[in-house]
Image: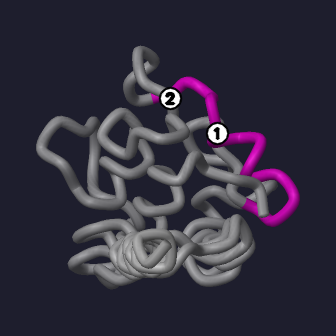
Amino acid sequence: MRSRPVLERGAGLLLLLLVAACGTVKTPTEPSEEPGGGTAFPFTRIQAEIFTPNCATAGCHDAASGSAGLVLAAGRSYGEIVGRPATGRPSMNRIEPGDPNRSYLVKKLRGDADITGDRMPLGRPGGLPQAQIDGLVAWVRAGAPND
């Protein structure tokens, strides 16, 4: 009769160790943390901190000029980039959900060697702060949700 309580305690301890080994579980609404890539920005933050002040400006990607056929103004930008072919490289999408390295917009923001033209945004020496690029890359890696 003694073996059953010992067995139950052992099973309880095993369950406790398994739960501890798994770490914390994030809910679907929490930002995802990617190794070496930072926390994914929600799209609303990408719009407010990257596109609106740096890209959707007069003569660039605002609604009036839409350089390279791309408008990055609030309310239009998501539909213009996600799953849409890049003008500079039609074999790639501007944003390929889940794959930052196959997303031409990411390449333009990083200034990758295989882009056409200059690193974006123009007029900003050195490009965007690395934290903003990392947040956008993590968003793409997370599937580019429209949140």
Determine if the magenta segment contains residue 85: yes
In the image, what residue type sits under mark 2? Asn
The residue tagged 1 is 82
Q: Are marks 1 and 2 in contact (CB under 8 Å)?
A: yes
Q: Position of residue 105 (x, y in %)?
A: 44, 47
The residue under the point 42% across, 24% down is 92
> In the image as oriented, which residue stretches furthest toward the left?
113
Decide: is 77 above or below 117.
below
Decide: is 30 above or below 105.
below
Determine if the magenta segment contains residue 26: no
Main secondary structure along the magenta-highlighted residues: loop
Q: CA distance from mark 1 to mark 2?
A: 7 Å
Q: Quadrant of residue 58?
A: bottom right
Task: Indicate the secondary structure of the residue bearing disc 1.
Answer: loop
Neighbours of disc 1 within 10 Å: few (<14), some (14-19), many (20+): many
Which residues lie in the magenta part? 73-87
- N-terminal-most mark, 1 or 2: 1
Residue 140 as seen in the image, left or right of residue 126? right
Q: Position of residue 91 (x, y in %)?
A: 41, 15
The tally of labels here is 2
Residue 52 seen by the camera: no
Task: Indicate the secondary structure of the residue bearing disc 2.
Answer: loop
**Residue sitting nearer the eye, 102 or 13:** 13
> In the image as oriented, which residue stretches furthest toward the right?
75
The residue under the point 50% across, 79% down is 5
The residue under the point 48% across, 41% down is 98
Decide: is 139 above or below 16.
above
Neighbours of disc 2 within 10 Å: few (<14), some (14-19), many (20+): many
What is the number of the mark on residue 93?
Answer: 2
